[in-house]
Image (cartoon, rainbow, N blue to C red):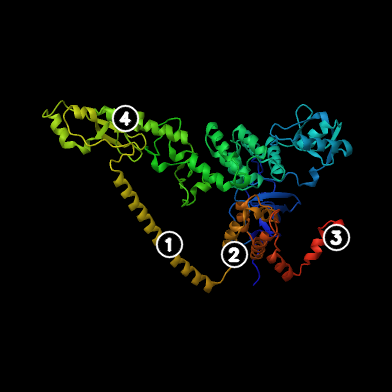
Amino acid sequence: MAKPQKLSQLLIGKEVALNFNLCDISGEPHPAAGKRATVIARNSKTAYQVGAEDGAVYVVQESDWTPYPNKLHPDTMDLTDHRKTINLYTDAKLNKVEQLLLGTIHESPFNPRTNYPAEEMEELAESAREVGIMQPVLVRPRGDGGYELVFGHRRHRAALTAKLEFIPAIVRDLTDAQSAQLQAVENVQRRDLDPMDEALGYAAFIAAHGITKDELARQIGKSRTHVYNRLKLATLHAPGQAALRAGKIRAEVATRVARVVGEKNQAKALALMLEPGYGGELKSLRAARSELSEKFTLDLKAALWALDDAGLVASAGACTVCPKRSGVDPIVYADLLDKPDYYSNSPKGQNVCTDPDCFAGKKTAQLKRNQEALEAKGKIMVTGNAARKAVDAQGNVKGDYIPVSEMREALKSANKGTAGPAVTTLTIQNPRDGKTIEVVKRKEAEAAGVKTPPAKPANGRTDWNAYERDRKEEEKAREAKAAEQTRINVAALHKVRETAARVGTGLFELRMIAQVTIAGVAYVDKGVLLALYDAEDTDDLKDKAGRMSKEELTTLLLDCALVDNVRMLGYGKPEAPEPMLAAAMQYGVDVEAVRQAYTPAEVTA
């Protein structure tokens, strides 16, 4: 059975109709609106190049493609349900090169690149001295008779350093919006663009032109997830930006640090991320997600206040619409919306707060509001640090206070005057959960002649043996529950095996096996395996495996089996790599020829 073509492949060469309401980047009617065009190529994950009848080439977007070829009607399919942009630099008529005086050209204020490594720039300048600037820059006229760079800033700086008089340039009469779009498109197509520069460029573009994140994503042909995360990266504090540029943290990890609210908290998060991982490696994305989530996120299920209360802290507003709540920005906080991890205490779901300081501020405000309401009813309150010392983490009253519930009858007698003076009832407000407990002071009760129970220790328990008994019972219950779950899992395993035997194996099974096999490769051998697939770390390789074909997965599994035989250690007795030799024999590889090719001639002579 022939392998079905991907939707993107089916579209190439098909004729499509462009919307009648199609606009260009400036919002003006597009010259090709309502006309037919032919799909030429896929430009990016969500963008396609189409050729109009007059020969012009445009870039159009489509956010929601159907994954089913049988639902595809390419002759009538509308590629432009969303706002589209013109690819302004594919028209040959506009690509006339001129030689301009270098002194008449000025850098763009919206240039996203800010990082110009000295060594690279000196090499580029040296090349400019020897052969000049080979690739023209793009400029637009300025009102003062000069020109403004659109892109080509590195070449421009190199020409200045090389003291050139002229530079080849293409002159376009562009609006601010068109210039900014061209810069954005040019920069996202450059592989060497620093992630931080890309992020700051996106932020500057949005600030200058007042467009939304989604509009920017559509204009530059990037996914919403990529644009949203780069814009979040743009909020990273200065030390974090420096660490990213210096290669001390990965871009994905830096984005997670940028999600932490406030410079002080970002500084703490950065320090945590700069701690080396296992074997001195940079902190992986998985480790970053786990550590930062545990330290800088809170579950709003524990909130003492109503999430829709906008007046509790006026400057913060309601949690329901706060952009720092996971459910409000599901693209940036996609990982927080995953199912809870059995091995992690990190909160998950729609109501995760990512601003610990705001959470603490609202908690304090709600406690104060509750305190004032109780005092208005005549309650005598014990709050703050005094309350924290009086109640342990489990909510047990300890030390100088006794719960009224433990000596209610005795207190009734004392307050009727049958014993000593009346005993004052106080209300402790637990600062941890906001709950209140009515208590009396131990010394005051004893002075009134009331018999009091023994004082509780710091952990709130009076009987250590009882505590140990309870602990062992809880442990026994946990073990019983785990054993029961194990039996269920084993039964499920048998059912899965029976079904798999009937259905047969495919991509799903191979990908699952690959995930487990990759994790099982020894740490000392993973470097070779990662290099084979140009993967940053194990997580990256697992992600790649999730997109591999059956043939690619088979090769990956073979690599995992053989990589243990590659790395030779400098100690102990060397052993023959039997699996590698067996594979070489199977595939007809001449190991001796390989040895000769990689052995210095003087050794083999």
The one of 598 and 221 positioned closer to us in this rendering: 598
**Contact, mark 3 vs mark 1 (Cβ under 8 Å):** no
Quarter the N terminus occupies? bottom right
**Along the line of sight, the residue nearer the viewer: 496 or 582:** 582
Helix, strand, or loop for circle 3? helix
Q: Which residue is mark 4?
A: 371
Label whose residue precedes the other's in the sequence (4 or 3): 4
Q: Is residue 486 visible to us here?
A: yes
Number of disc labels:
4
| Residue carrying label 2 | 510
Amino acid type of the residue tagged 2 in the rendering? Leu
Along the polypeptide, which appears first: circle 4 or circle 2?
4
Disc 2 from disc 1: Cα separation = 25 Å
Closer to the N terminus: mark 4 or mark 1? Answer: 4
Residue at which label 1 appears: 486
Q: CA distance from mark 3 to mark 1?
A: 59 Å
